[in-house]
């Protein structure tokens, strides 16, 4: 009688039990009455179970619209049959990737209780096994960049469409007009403020995707009558005397540009307070020296 008359209480209990699939299933199967009452909210409960277990995967599925049956998705992901493109902080925990988030195809391997990250690169790279406890190292494409970069969504333009990209020698190369995420250049200069944390798109090789590199916006100059701007970014995980500490970047449109550090730069985005706190979890205890 209590269960039938107080359904919100039943659903509150069910939601509390989403910390554990075992506890939830035991509660759900406790009686026909409980099963009947919970049935109405079953998809929402499995969605919460999934998001608690694999938050970055859940962000991807919600954005791309790939979630229809969260219970089936839970089983599929648990068995290693779901994979998506995520960004990995502190790749392989190598100092060369300090304060960077690098794209990889990621799946969960229940046999070892870990994520398997296969990095997207122009050269062959061995997969990294990331312990489940290090799941905070994974994120889906930043929220403010999703509408423009369209992660997980195929471009609509023809495969033959091309655009110009500047090479390191000052020449020009033809590259696909709408490369798949995360190879697209983030356009625009909106939302940037001197002194705030920013993420810069940078890659070493033309054929590789961009990683996001965290720094602080030291100076910003917008070109009058143009959507282009010049920015000076400092990377505080390097010593002030390091050649890698300060970088000047021209950005705002869809073009790749050669970088004085080597490689190529794309766009710049501002970070939120929550994103800043997340980056600080990976800030090296000692300055990075090569």
Image (cartoon, rainbow, N blue to C red):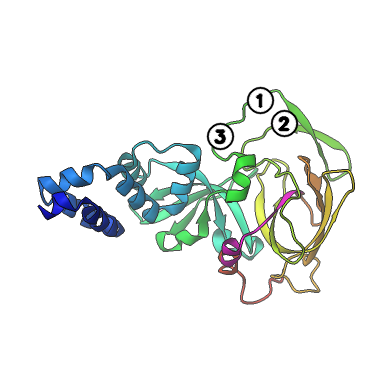
Q: CA distance from mark 2 to mark 1?
A: 8 Å
Inspect the magenta stretch and tell me whether residue 267 lies in it. Answer: yes
Numbered badge on residue 177: 2
Mark 1, other Cα within 10 Å: few <14 / some 14–19 / many ≥20: few
- Relative to 56, does residue 162 appear above or below in the rendering? above
- Secondary structure, mark 2, is loop
Tell me if label 2 and label 1 are in contact, CB under 8 Å.
yes
Q: Can you identify the residue that label 1 sits on?
A: 157
Q: Nearer the viewer, residue 94 or 21?
A: 21
Q: CA distance from mark 1 to mark 3?
A: 12 Å
User: Mark 3 or mark 2, which is nearer the start of the sequence?
Assistant: 3
Query: Residue at (25%, 53%) from the top-left corner?
Result: 8
- Residues rendered magenta in the picture: 265-277
Numbered badge on residue 262: none
Query: Residue at (62%, 72%) from the top-left corner?
Result: 284
Inspect the magenta stretch and tell me whether residue 253 lies in it. Answer: no
Percent coordinates x, y for residue 166 in the rendering: 83, 40
Percent coordinates x, y for residue 67 in the rendering: 40, 38
- Relative to 283, does residue 40 appear above or below in the rendering? above
């Amino acid at each position: 009688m209590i269960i039938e008359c107080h359904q919100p209480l039943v659903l509150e209990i069910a939601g509390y039990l989403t910390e554990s699939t075992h506890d939830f299933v035991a509660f759900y199967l406790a009686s026909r009455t409980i099963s009947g009452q919970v049935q109405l909210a079953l998809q929402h409960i499995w969605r919460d179970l999934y998001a608690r277990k694999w938050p970055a995967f859940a962000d991807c599925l919600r954005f791309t619209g790939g979630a229809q049956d969260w219970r089936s998705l839970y089983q599929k992901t648990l068995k290693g049959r779901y994979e998506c493109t995520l960004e990995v902080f502190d790749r392989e925990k190598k100092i060369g990737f300090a304060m960077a988030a690098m794209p990889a195809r990621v799946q969960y391997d229940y046999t070892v209780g870990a994520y398997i990250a296969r990095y997207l690169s122009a050269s062959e790279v061995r997969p990294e096994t990331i312990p489940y406890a290090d799941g905070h190292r994974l994120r889906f494409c930043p929220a403010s960049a999703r509408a423009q970069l369209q992660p997980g969504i195929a471009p609509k333009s023809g495969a033959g469409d091309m655009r110009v990209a500047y090479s390191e020698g000052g020449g020009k190369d033809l590259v696909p007009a709408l490369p798949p995420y995360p190879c697209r250049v983030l356009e625009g200069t909106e939302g940037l403020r001197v002194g705030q944390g920013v993420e810069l798109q940078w890659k070493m090789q033309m054929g590789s995707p961009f990683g996001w590199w965290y720094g602080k916006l030291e100076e910003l100059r917008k070109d009058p009558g143009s959507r282009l701007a010049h920015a000076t970014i400092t990377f505080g995980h390097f010593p002030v005397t390091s050649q890698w500490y300060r970088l000047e970047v021209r950005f705002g449109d869809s073009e790749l540009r050669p970088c004085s550090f080597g490689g190529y730069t794309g766009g710049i985005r501002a970070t939120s307070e929550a994103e800043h706190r997340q980056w600080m979890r990976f800030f090296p205890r000692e300055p990075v020296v090569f």
